[in-house]
Image: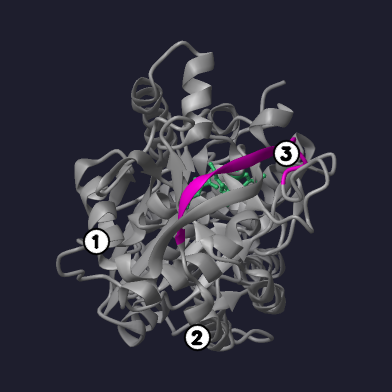
């Protein structure tokens, strides 16, 4: 049971912002979920370090491109540490093994490469060619100024693969479903792909094998990271990728160009490609050049990493765009986390600690009315497998809200005051049982807080050997819960 998941490799021209954090958090949640369920997971992320965009940024900062990459890639690693990202490998396209793999890949597909002239529009910030029909003055993706290029280039011939790629995409590879046709329609416009740059214009790249006057196009170089990271050109234990997660800005590179490159090399194709939406600020895409980026380091300092992880996946369906604001985070923090979740854990754990210091025993197996826990769990698993975080979290909050109501109605504190200890113990056991279910479901999203609560409630967390074993672990009726107070998990935000 292997599972290979990737994020895009991010450009090192500038430090990471909340958009980069979004993709990487989503991948991390899936990686953690799959590991829980017994998969041998390989989770890849990294940085994209070649090309004109990086060369220009380095020049402006008075450094060499490699110096800039050495500094900036560290910022990404630091952020992944702060956000508790459990990646298995961090690849840099300047890694010698990657550069070697790119050269070997070029040699392998040589039969599909020819030399000619490139004449047309190009967007440096996107490192993308723009067809004559789409080009006005500005890039249709990012709105910035285009450059007109006229130069010798190597091309990858695509005509042989157009039909094959169409058949591939017709099998529901691209998610969410509403992106499928958009990608299939784009195949018609596709022309042979320029895959090199003259060294006279772009210095910073991997030299074309056998022609030192050219460097390899940065996207051609970058996409190969997904296979070089797992061993290409040698045996690749984890390939094909089970899922590439990307933003919608780069879906065509992943769903059309990358499969064509793989077809030309005779390599298996990725199983799924998920394109999520954009975080915007006041309706505009968050981007470095617009200077409207939200700093994830700052946010994590104020709210804690679990809150950032939770907020980004709770607030909007994965696949849609969303508007970011600090008020929204504060609202989610106060209502969902502090009030509904943290308070539930705190009041039940305190009650148990003060009244049942030896543990809360199972006097009878828990039974709940108006809720089918096992059915909700099955549904949660299905949603998680579909990367439908939004609805997975909705299911979790159905259970949280049920538990809060259960506590309010059964009022174990009143039972204790009336001297009805046995009835109170039953109710607290039931609530501890619900909290156990909640913790397993919260774990991939909020690993730090979930682990603390698990420890305080005596909930045993382990990876299982498969779905059935995991479900058994989640639904198991312990004989006893040994509980101590969780303390305040979501303190009031100052200022
Ligand atoms: O495109 N909202 O790198 P990049 C949501 N190096 N996600 C966002 C976002 C936003 N406002 N801004 C960025 C590249 N992202 C190439 C990729 S892969 C072989 C090469 C996320 O630094 C989203 O995942 O521009 C988007 O696709 C990615 O960052 C682009 O990062
Ligand atoms: Mg970009």
Residue beneath disc 3: 330
Tag nearer the camera, 3 or 2: 2
Residue beneath disc 1: 230
Decide which of tag 3 and tag 1 comes sooner along the chain.
1
The residue positioned 59% from the left and 56% from the top of the image is 250
Above-or-below relation of 70 to 45: above
CA separation in Å, label 2 and label 1: 25 Å
The residue positioned 54% from the left and 58% from the top of the image is 246
In the image, taking residue 7 as reference, residue 278 lies left or right, namely right
Residue 373 x %, y %: 55, 83
Please name whichever residue, 400 or 10, is drawn nearer the observer in this view of the structure.
Answer: 10
116 in the magenta segment: no
Residue 362 x %, y %: 39, 76
Numbered mark located on residue 293 in the image = none
The residue positioned 32% from the left and 41% from the top of the image is 206
Please name whichever residue, 7 or 354, is drawn nearer the observer in this view of the structure.
Answer: 7
In the image, taking residue 251 as reference, residue 28 lies left or right, namely left
Residue 306 x %, y %: 52, 45
Magenta part, dominant SS: strand
Classify the position of the C terminus by image quarter.
top right
Residue 52 x %, y %: 50, 33
In the image, taking residue 441 as reference, residue 203 lies left or right, namely left
The magenta stretch spans which residues?
142-155
Please name whichever residue, 165 or 181, is drawn nearer the observer in this view of the structure.
Answer: 165
CA separation in Å, label 3 and label 2: 48 Å
**Pointer 3 and pointer 1: residues touching (CB < 8 Å)?**
no
Residue beneath disc 2: 164
């Amino acid at each position: 049971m292997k599972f290979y998941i990737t994020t895009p490799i991010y450009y090192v021209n500038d430090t990471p912002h909340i958009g980069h954090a979004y993709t990487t958090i989503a991948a991390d949640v899936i990686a953690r979920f799959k590991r829980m369920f017994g998969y041998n997971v390989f989770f890849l992320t990294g940085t994209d370090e070649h090309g004109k965009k990086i060369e220009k940024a380095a020049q402006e900062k008075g450094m060499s491109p490699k110096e800039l990459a050495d500094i900036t890639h560290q910022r990404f690693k630091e952020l992944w540490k702060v956000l508790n990202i459990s990646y298995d490998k961090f690849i840099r396209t300047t890694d010698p093994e990657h550069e070697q793999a790119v050269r070997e890949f070029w040699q392998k597909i040589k039969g599909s490469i020819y030399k000619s002239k490139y004449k047309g529009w190009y967007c440096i910030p996107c490192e993308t060619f723009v067809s004559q029909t789409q080009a006005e003055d500005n890039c249709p993706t990012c709105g910035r100024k285009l450059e007109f290029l006229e130069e010798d280039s190597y091309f990858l011939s695509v005509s042989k693969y157009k039909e094959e790629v169409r058949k591939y995409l017709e099998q529901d590879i691209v998610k969410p479903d509403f992106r499928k046709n958009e990608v299939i329609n784009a195949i018609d416009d596709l022309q042979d792909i320029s895959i090199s740059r003259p060294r006279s214009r772009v210095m910073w790249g991997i030299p074309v094998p056998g022609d030192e006057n050219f460097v390899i196009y940065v996207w051609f170089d970058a996409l190969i990271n997904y296979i070089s990271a797992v061993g290409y050109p040698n045996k690749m234990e984890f390939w094909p990728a089970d899922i590439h997660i990307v933003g919608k800005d780069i879906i065509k590179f992943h769903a059309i160009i990358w499969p064509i490159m793989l077809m030309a090399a005779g390599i298996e194709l990725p199983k799924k490609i998920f394109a999520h939406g954009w975080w915007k600020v006041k309706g505009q895409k968050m981007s470095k050049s617009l200077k409207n980026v939200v700093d994830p380091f700052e946010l994590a300092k104020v709210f804690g990493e679990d809150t950032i992880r939770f907020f980004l996946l709770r607030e909007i369906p994965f696949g849609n765009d969303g508007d970011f604001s600090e008020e929204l985070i504060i609202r989610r923090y106060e209502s969902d986390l502090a009030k509904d979740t943290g308070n539930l854990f705190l009041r039940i754990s305190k009650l148990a600690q003060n009244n049942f210091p030896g543990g809360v025993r199972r006097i009878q197996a828990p039974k709940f009315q108006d809720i089918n826990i096992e059915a909700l769990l099955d549904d949660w698993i299905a949603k998680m497998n579909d990367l439908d975080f939004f609805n997975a979290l909705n299911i979790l909050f159905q259970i949280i809200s049920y538990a809060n109501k259960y506590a309010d109605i059964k009022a174990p504190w009143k039972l204790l005051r009336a001297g009805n200890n046995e009835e109170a113990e039953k109710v607290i056991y039931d609530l501890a049982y619900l909290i156990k279910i909640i913790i397993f479901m919260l774990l991939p999203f909020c690993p730090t807080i979930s682990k603390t609560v698990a420890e305080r409630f005596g909930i045993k967390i382990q990876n299982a050997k498969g779905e059935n074993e995991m479900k058994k672990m989640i639904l198991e009726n312990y004989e006893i819960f040994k509980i101590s107070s969780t303390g305040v998990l979501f303190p009031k935000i100052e200022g």
